[in-house]
């Protein structure tokens, strides 16, 4: 079995590669990644020299490069993690999101049609459903919830999902889609809430909470997400969408306070800053379908997962310090340095 994992030098993709190399040591894993700011080759160091692993530095938007790779590798499965994923960046500059997330998906699926494939899997997001109100804790996203996006990021992911389902209906491409809630864990790029707050707290820098920090996210440990995708590509029904979530809803402000507590840092570091434009209020997933059909359940409780994650960032300072001191620093200053402090 040969699997092409796109975006494998990023957060969830790299964790998926580690998971697959361990769970299926007889598989050949080919990582296709163009190493944007969020991709990091050092992350893949533990598998780089394995005989059943290959890294290819190309973009999923490069049709010739993708076709060449398919000719060389004859993949049985493609799992597409490659995406521009940061909502704030999509608000600043939507174009690259359309290019990578929509066009890149089309190029990959065209290659699958041309060369044949057992399964094309699209890694999507619960953000395609928009958001839920805070005063209706009884509501959850199911696979039947209408698409209703808020940001250029989520719109690009929804566009890609629709394209994937269209390729299934029109060309009979054997596809599946997973829509997951917020992930956390090792190798999470320090522009996202949890790793950013850990890194800033460790450096005694302000912790920029958007608005009041009342927004709710449904957090899932990344390894649980990887197990879900492993199950879907092997046992999921073709043409289906599976929601993946941990029933673990937390307010942003509570997460930031928890990080302060775990690191022994004062809550006075918390700085309320101007809210994200179009900020989604609450995400909450109903994972009944994947549980009933594939027997998937999250295994890591948030209380344990956040401790493991914090320990990983303490033990791997070099990984994230290199990132925040490099090119990313300019972006960080622009995004957060100038964010106006507001009253909570
Ligand atoms: C970076 C940052 C974020 N926030 C808030 C904004 C959100 O309410 C929450 C999480 O933000 P983050 O940007 O980490 O993640 P989401 O916007 O929920 O989106 C993430 O989860 C979904 C499923 C994906 O599909 C996205 O790819 C992924 O980035 O914290 C702050 O208050 N301060 C900050 O500095």
Image (cartoon, rainbow, N blue to C red):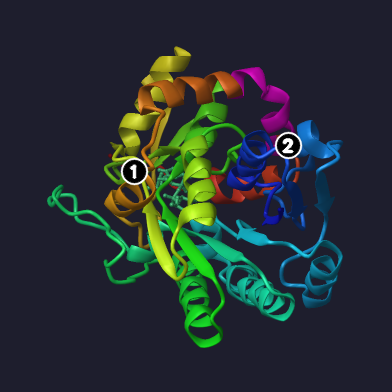
Q: Is residue 277 above or below residue 290?
A: below
Q: Report the residue that reaches farthest toward the top.
A: 264
Of mark 2 and mark 1, the one earlier in the sequence is: 2
Q: Position of residue 220 (x, y in %)?
A: 41, 39
Q: Which residue is mark 1?
A: 218
Q: Dot 1: few (<14), some (14–19), or many (≥20) neighbours within 10 Å?
A: many
Q: What residue do we see at 27% from left, 66% from top?
A: 145
Q: Is residue 176 left or right of residue 41?
A: left
Q: Position of residue 309 (x, y in %)?
A: 52, 26
Q: Is residue 34 above or below residue 302?
A: below
Q: What residue do we see at 29% from left, 42% from top?
A: 212
| Residue in front for this viewpoint, 23 or 197 | 23
Q: Is 321 covered by the magenta stretch?
A: yes
Determine if the C-beta at disc 2 is less than 8 A from ligand 1. Answer: no
Q: What residue do we see at 71% from left, 75% from top?
A: 111
Report, in whole angstroms, how far the alpha carbon at label 2 lies from the one at label 1. Answer: 26 Å
Name the quadrant of the C terminus.
Answer: top left
| Residue in front for this viewpoint, 281 or 297 | 297
Q: What residue do we see at 50% from left, 21% from top?
A: 308
In the rendered image, which quarter is residue 118 located in? Answer: bottom right
Q: Which residue is mark 2?
A: 43
Q: Which stretch is magenta?
A: 313-324
Q: Position of residue 168 (x, y in %)?
A: 51, 78
Q: Is residue 61 above or below residue 122?
A: below
**Local secondary structure at mark 1:** strand
Query: Most prominent secondary structure in the magenta stretch?
Result: helix
Q: Position of residue 70 (x, y in %)?
A: 79, 68
């Amino acid at each position: 079995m040969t699997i092409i994992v796109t975006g494998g030098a990023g957060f969830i993709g790299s964790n998926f590669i580690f998971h697959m190399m361990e769970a299926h040591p007889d598989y050949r894993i080919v990582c296709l990644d163009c190493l944007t700011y969020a991709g990091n080759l050092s992350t893949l160091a533990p598998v780089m020299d394995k005989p059943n692993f290959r890294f290819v530095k190309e973009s999923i938007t490069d049709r010739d490069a993708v076709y060449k790779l398919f000719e060389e590798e004859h993949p049985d499965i493609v799992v597409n993690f490659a995406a521009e994923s940061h909502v704030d960046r999509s608000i600043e500059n939507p174009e690259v999101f359309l290019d990578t997330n929509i066009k890149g998906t089309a190029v990959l699926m065209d290659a699958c049609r041309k060369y044949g494939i057992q399964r094309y899997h699209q890694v999507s997001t619960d953000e395609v459903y928009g958001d839920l109100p805070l005063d209706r804790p009884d509501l959850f996203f199911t696979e039947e919830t209408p698409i209703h996006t808020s940001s250029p990021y989520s719109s690009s992911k929804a566009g890609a999902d629709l394209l994937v389902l269209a390729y299934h209906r029109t060309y009979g491409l054997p596809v599946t889609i997973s829509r997951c809630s917020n992930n956390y864990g090792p190798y999470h790029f320090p522009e996202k809430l949890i790793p950013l707050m850990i890194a800033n707290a460790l450096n005694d820098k302000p912790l920029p909470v958007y608005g009041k920090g009342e927004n709710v996210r449904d957090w899932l440990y990344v390894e649980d997400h990887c197990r879900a995708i492993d199950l879907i590509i092997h046992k999921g029904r073709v043409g289906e969408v599976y929601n993946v979530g941990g029933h673990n809803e937390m307010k942003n402000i509570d997460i930031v306070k928890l990080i302060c507590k775990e690191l022994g840092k004062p809550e006075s570091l918390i700085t309320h800053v101007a809210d994200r434009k179009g900020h989604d209020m609450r995400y909450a997933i109903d994972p009944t379908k994947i549980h009933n059909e594939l027997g998937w359940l999250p295994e890591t409780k948030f209380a344990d997962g956040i401790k493991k994650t914090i320990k990983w960032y303490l033990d791997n300072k070099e990984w994230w310090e290199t990132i925040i001191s490099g090119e990313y620093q300019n972006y960080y200053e622009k995004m957060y340095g100038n964010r106006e402090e507001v009253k909570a």
